[in-house]
Image: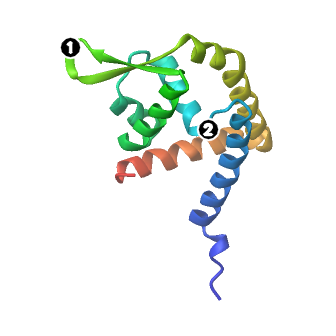
Amino acid sequence: MLDFTTFWCFRLNALSRKISRMYNSRCLEYGITAAQTFVIFDVMEHEGTSVKDIATRIQLDSPGVTGLIDRLVKEALLERKEDPEDRRSLRISLTPKARELADSKLVPMALEFNKYIRSIVQPEVAKIFQNSLDLFDQQLSKNGD
């Protein structure tokens, strides 16, 4: 009999969903979703960036990122500005409210959650695990995702 639960693709997907649910529930304490935090974190590092570039870096499609940005703009956490070099393009920036939320709540929460996730992996295999994740990412990126 076929036990699909032993397939790595199944296990990785199931674990990813568990981690995502845990992280998302922590984010919701601050009135924001996990995906929205990734947009905020990206814009923190790339102030005045484009939707397309955000989408590439957080590995979502542009329409999905546009929806996240729409909600963040509605919450006064992001703002869109016309690109002075290309009026058809918009630049995304954090508002002071977003910067305060990120600095005081979101970044510490994300760092603490990341520390928790890393603590699950035994220190003697952590480097091997990280290398394995990197290899998966590199190979899958070569194959077009």
Going by the image, does 98 lie left or right of 63?
Answer: right
What residue would you read off at disc 2?
A: 33
Residue at 64%, 13% (x, y): give it: 100
The kind of residue on which mark 1 rests is: Glu
Crowding at dot 1, Cα within 10 Å, few <14 / some 14-19 / many 20+, comes out as few
User: Earlier along the polypeptide chain: callout 1 or callout 2?
Assistant: 2
**Vertical order, 43 against 121 (above or below):** above
Q: Amino acid at mark 2?
A: Thr
The tally of labels here is 2
Q: Position of residue 86 (x, y in %)?
A: 20, 19
Locate residue 9 relative to residue 65 in the image: left or right.
right
Q: Quarter-wise, where is residue 126 in the image? A: top right
Name the quarter where the N terminus is drawn.
bottom right
Q: Residue at x 26, y 24 (%)?
A: 89
Above or below for 22 versus 91: below
Viewer-closest of 20 and 27: 27
Q: Which mark is residue 85?
A: 1
Instruction: Name the spot of residue 42 as percent of width and height, x first.
Output: 49, 25
Q: Is residue 96 left or right of residue 53?
A: right
